[in-house]
Image (cartoon, grey):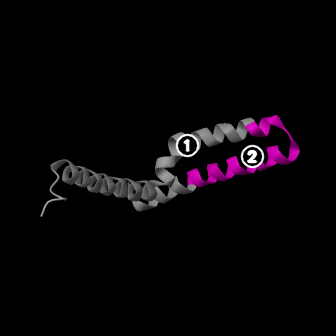
Amino acid sequence: MSKRSENKEKAKWLFVLFLAIISFILAFMTQQIIFNFIAIGLAICVYKYGNPVIFKEYDERRRKKYEEAMQVRQAAQTAITSKKIFKK
């Protein structure tokens, strides 16, 4: 995807998220159930389809940190099971 089309997709999903938030606020203020259903429907759509678009960079950074933590954990487990850490 080109940078421009990525920005358009991101803007589209941010707008849908904004509509969901506005709908939730309206439901809270007016006590109208229909706005709750609209907010829930939009939120589910954003969660399923918009999340990878909106939070792409964040998810990549989080995945990278998780992989590094798992490597450190595996190295620590290997060191503990081989018991070389306690010997001179």
Task: Name the magenta segment's main secondary structure.
Answer: helix
- Whole-percent x, y for residue 64 in the image: 34, 57
Report helix, strand or loop for mark 2. Answer: helix
Q: Disc 2 or 1, which lies upstream in sequence?
A: 2
Q: Nearer the viewer, residue 75 or 65?
A: 75
Q: CA distance from mark 2 to mark 1?
A: 15 Å
User: Is 88 situated left or right of 16 in this image?
Assistant: left
Residue most extreme to the right: 30
- Whole-percent x, y for residue 31 in the image: 86, 41
- On residue 20, the disc is none
Magenta region: which residues? 12-36
Q: Nearer the viewer, residue 77 or 10?
A: 77
- Whole-percent x, y for residue 19 in the image: 69, 49
Which residue bears the numbered disc 1?
47
Q: Residue at x 33, y 56 (%)?
A: 69
- Tell me the quarter of the image containing the N terminus: bottom left
Badge 2 density bin: few <14, some 14–19, many ≥20, Cα 10 Å: many
Q: Amino acid at mark 1?
A: Tyr
Q: Residue at x 63, y 42 (%)?
A: 43
User: Is 18 situated left or right of 2 in this image?
Assistant: right
Q: Is residue 41 magenta?
A: no
Q: Nearer the viewer, residue 69 or 43?
A: 69
Which residue bears the numbered disc 2?
24
